Amino acid sequence: MLTHALFFVLGLGALVAGAEALVRGASKIALSLGISPLVVGLTIVAMGTSSPEVAVSVGAAMNGNTDIAVGNVVGSNVFNVLFILGISAVITPLVVHSQIIRQEVPIMIGTSLILAVMTLDGKLGRWESGLLLALLVAYIVFLVRQSRAETAEIRDEFAGAAPHTGGWDRHWAVQVLLIMVGLALLVLGSKWLVDSAVAFARAFGVSDLIIGLTIIAAGTSMPEVATSIMAAVRGERDIAVGNVIGSNTFNILGCLGISGLVSRDGLGMAPAVLNFDIWVMIAVAVACLPVFIYGRRIGRRRGLLFLAYYVAYVVYLILGARQHDALDAFSAVMLSFVLPITVVTLVAMVIREQGTREPGG
């Protein structure tokens, strides 16, 4: 067991280091080729921070561990919003740009709903996976074209999300080497992480799905954690929020798209995912709209609320996995009191925000 724990930690370290090397090398090559910092920030950096999810889910799908592949993506999307935005907002209140509210969050919600519809038959087939990848390509092309019309203020904002062209790695040969090393670390780290996680699941009698939804999901989201927290500390408005929303969209379109294509028979969806977890992911995505709209910011109280909901989600998964006697009481409290109060509060926030905006036009 100690050996599995060691390889789990080494796998996490390799994923984080590999993502950092990949983002740095790819970003600097893109900048040296004249691609704008905005495009680099919205595409390469966002995809680079999601590369551990891709490496783990693709590796798991190729080995037949489809529950880990799916649980990793669904769990990461829940973790990204509730935990990463929550902890970032606790550090410093986050300002939300109107473009994220008008465009990025609806796209994230839309991709989540598309996934739910595609998996109604209990499976994400190869042609459906190919469609997700096609939507990702269309999304990237849309962002590139849109970036050409962005203001100088937005360009300067996202310039902070990509490395500068100078430094020890300014030579193209070093940048190519960074990309190769990053990819190698991602492949190696994903193998170590998945193998050790499966061993943990078997040792503790927990399903691969639960491991994927919790430990692996949190572990592969470490680059997003680092990026968003550092952005919050530096006061870079929207980077912390945009990184999370963009990564969630990429996880569904890119990560599940590639995983479904490399899997022999597509990705089978466990009943627990179809009946519960995927709807939690959608609910979390939808909840972003009223939270973001109200005051165009995420304050510390809302950040703490996000964190509390993530803790509640993990507690529910653990109680369910162990078939604990407290599961029924916990579920009753959440369904009878917590969730209704939350829905009423979110609706009230939207109504109040509309009321404050109408008098001023």
Image (cartoon, rainbow, N blue to C red):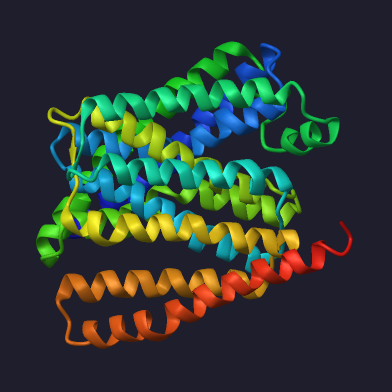
**Along the horizontal axis of the image, is 89 left or right of 139?**
right
Residue 145 picture location, percent across and down: 66, 20
Q: Is residue 161 left or right of residue 83?
A: right
Question: Camera-side residue: 164 or 77?
Answer: 77
For the point 34% across and 69% down, the residue is: 314
Q: Position of residue 223 (x, y in %)?
A: 50, 45
For residue 292, above or below residue 108? below
Which residue corresponds to the image point at 27% horizontal and 32% vertical from the top-left?
A: 259
Name the image quarter holding residue 189: top left
Locate the C terminus and report the quarter of the image it occupies. Answer: bottom right
Quarter occupied by the N terminus? bottom left
Can see residue 301?
yes
In the rendering, at what x and y percent does residue 232 appear? 68, 55
Q: Residue at x 72, y 47 (%)?
A: 98
Question: What is the quadrant of residue 111 in the picture?
Answer: top left
Number of numbered markers: 0
Residue 13 seen from this side: no
Left or right side of 140 for 53: left
Residue positioned 43% across, 60% down in the render: 283
Residue 136, above or below 344: above
